[in-house]
């Protein structure tokens, strides 16, 4: 009996190890068989190997998920247009991006060309050299959305690829192969079993989720199929749609590496300064507290404090306030608007039993952003004035603006201090750039609402801007358009 058991165990062990070995070998064999058909379907190994440069013109529609003017779908669509140009041999990559929606106002070019690499801002007419150009990092997003480039890489790295399995996409059977990337996680590539076209790819980033691409509408050019459109899908929501308008194959792209020599060449900027959590007293009892890109204003009233802003890190910001205002409770926490990065503070305020204040239109979004949907919440229709013996604080809905249909700003009329999110801010002192439509409309909305601030605090900058900065920015935009 013992002998039989032993034999059984040995045979089980053997069959397991054989199985593992078979799994790897089968996977590699299957991968190679699929790849062979894919190469043929994409024009053959010679054509793919000879493809060294390509240019693509495109139009994009970007969907502003949880960042639209309204709290729910349909999300706002921001249209952009551009082109990308790649030379694999010389490791040159150029990409142009221009806003086509009036809300936004940009026209930028990135040139990666070894020592001659630049960021070009065609709106500001400036050129900034890139200190450490990185071809693969910069071209990565383009390569990931260009099937022929992915297949080229798959051919080069087939030794590290595996057959992941079969999957059904839109009623069609697909073979799925893995592709190891130089930068970032591996990609799963889905090839239609009938025509061997790449129809879908996926990457998984643990803290972020599933990033998927859908490639559609292939047309042949120079004996190779090129997709005329793709969609970017993040966690099952469409983030972006692209139409590829034209492809140019194997033509030199050196012309694209030039910039307008009348533009102002700026020095390479200093590396970004660390921005640790800090507290500034703007006026007696008025504090701007924050760091690393998110700030909130705290205003001392007679017997309590009003907090304004709901970005990340509210508990730490409250702790810094308590160091200087230990004896007054925070009574209100004001949410400027419903965007995902501006409602994080709702939970923090609700946890401390602070009444959250928001525009009426954002009530549901804000309640849903906490685990306390029955929290204390005060909603505001157009304006509310907090006034006591020591101070007046006005909350004004200055919407609609190009950024949000409703948006609360906090204004201290006596001190002429304004706190506003996402409409105007300086990234460094004196660094004033032409106003986009959003900042232009913001300036108009302030006038319309009789807001006459001379200090403008922003939810995303530690720099206190002035009314003159805003006026100059608006003027710069008008000058550029004239
Ligand atoms: Zn926003």
Image: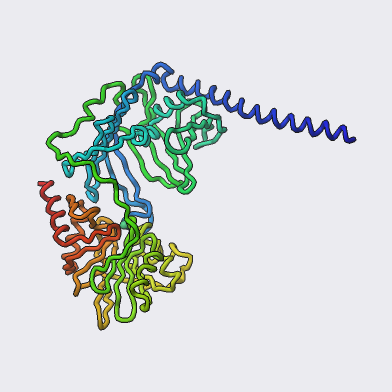
- Decide which of 256, 128 is in the foreground and name it: 128
> Does residue 323 appear left or right of residue 264 in this picture?
right
Q: Which residue is situated farthest in the right direction here? A: 1
Quadrant housing residue 252? top left
Q: Position of residue 310 (x, y in %)?
A: 36, 63
Quadrant housing residue 184? top left
297 in relation to 104, above or below: below
> Does residue 425 appear left or right of residue 234 in this picture?
left
The image's colouring method is rainbow
164 in relation to 47, above or below: below
- Decide which of 220, 180 is in the foreground and name it: 180
Q: Position of residue 271 (x, y in %)?
A: 29, 46
Quadrant holding ligand 1? bottom left
Quadrant housing residue 456? bottom left
Q: Position of residue 99 (x, y in %)?
A: 24, 44
- Name the residue rendered at 28%, 35% in the picture: 95
- Name the residue rendered at 34%, 19% in the picture: 222
42 in relation to 269, above or below: above
Q: Which residue is situated farthest in the top direction here? A: 46
């Amino acid at each position: 009996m013992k002998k039989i058991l032993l034999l059984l165990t040995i045979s089980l062990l053997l069959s397991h190890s054989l199985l593992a070995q078979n799994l790897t070998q089968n996977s590699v064999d299957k991968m190679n068989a699929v790849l062979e058909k894919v190469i043929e379907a994409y024009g053959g190994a010679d054509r793919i190997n000879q493809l060294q440069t390509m240019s693509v013109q495109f139009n994009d529609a970007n969907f502003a998920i949880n960042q639209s003017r309204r709290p729910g779908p349909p999300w706002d669509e921001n249209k952009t247009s551009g082109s990308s140009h790649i030379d694999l041999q010389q490791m040159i990559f150029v990409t142009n991006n221009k806003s086509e929606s009036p809300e936004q106002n940009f026209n930028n070019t990135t040139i990666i060309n070894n020592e001659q690499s630049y960021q070009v801002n065609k709106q500001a007419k400036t050129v900034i050299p890139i200190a450490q150009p990185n071809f693969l990092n910069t071209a990565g997003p383009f390569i990931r959305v260009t099937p022929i480039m992915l297949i080229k890489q798959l051919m080069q790295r087939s030794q590290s690829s595996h057959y992941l399995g079969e999957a059904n996409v839109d009623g069609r059977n697909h073979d799925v192969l893995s592709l190891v990337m130089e930068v970032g996680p591996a990609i799963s590539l889905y090839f239609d079993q009938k025509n061997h076209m790449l129809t879908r790819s996926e990457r998984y980033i643990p803290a972020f989720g599933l990033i998927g691409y859908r490639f559609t509408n292939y047309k042949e050019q120079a004996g190779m199929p090129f997709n005329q459109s793709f969609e970017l899908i993040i966690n099952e929501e469409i983030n972006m749609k692209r139409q590829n308008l034209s492809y140019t194959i194997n033509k030199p792209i050196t012309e694209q590496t030039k910039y307008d020599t009348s533009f102002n060449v700026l020095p390479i900027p200093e590396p970004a300064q660390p921005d640790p959590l800090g507290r500034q007293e703007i006026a007696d009892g008025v504090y701007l507290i924050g760091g690393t890109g998110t700030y909130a204003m705290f205003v001392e009233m007679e017997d309590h404090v009003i907090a304004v802003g709901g970005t990340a890190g509210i508990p730490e910001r409250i702790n810094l306030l308590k160091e200087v205002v230990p004896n007054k409770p925070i009574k209100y926490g004001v949410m400027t608007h419903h965007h995902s990065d501006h409602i994080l503070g709702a939970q923090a305020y609700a946890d401390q039993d602070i009444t959250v204040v928001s525009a009426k239109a954002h009530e549901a979004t804000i309640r849903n952003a906490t685990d306390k949907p029955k929290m204390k919440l005060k909603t505001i229709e157009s304006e509310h004035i907090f006034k006591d013996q020591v101070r007046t604080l006005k909350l004004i809905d200055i919407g609609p603006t190009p950024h949000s249909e409703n948006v609360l700003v906090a204004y201290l009329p006596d001190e002429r201090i304004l706190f506003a999110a996402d409409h105007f801010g300086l990234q460094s002192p004196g660094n004033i750039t032409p106003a986009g439509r959003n900042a232009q409309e913001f300036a108009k909305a302030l006038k319309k609402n009789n807001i006459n601030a001379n200090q403008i605090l922003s939810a995303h900058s530690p720099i206190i801007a002035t009314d003159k900065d805003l006026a100059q920015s608006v003027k710069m935009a008008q000058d550029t358009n004239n």
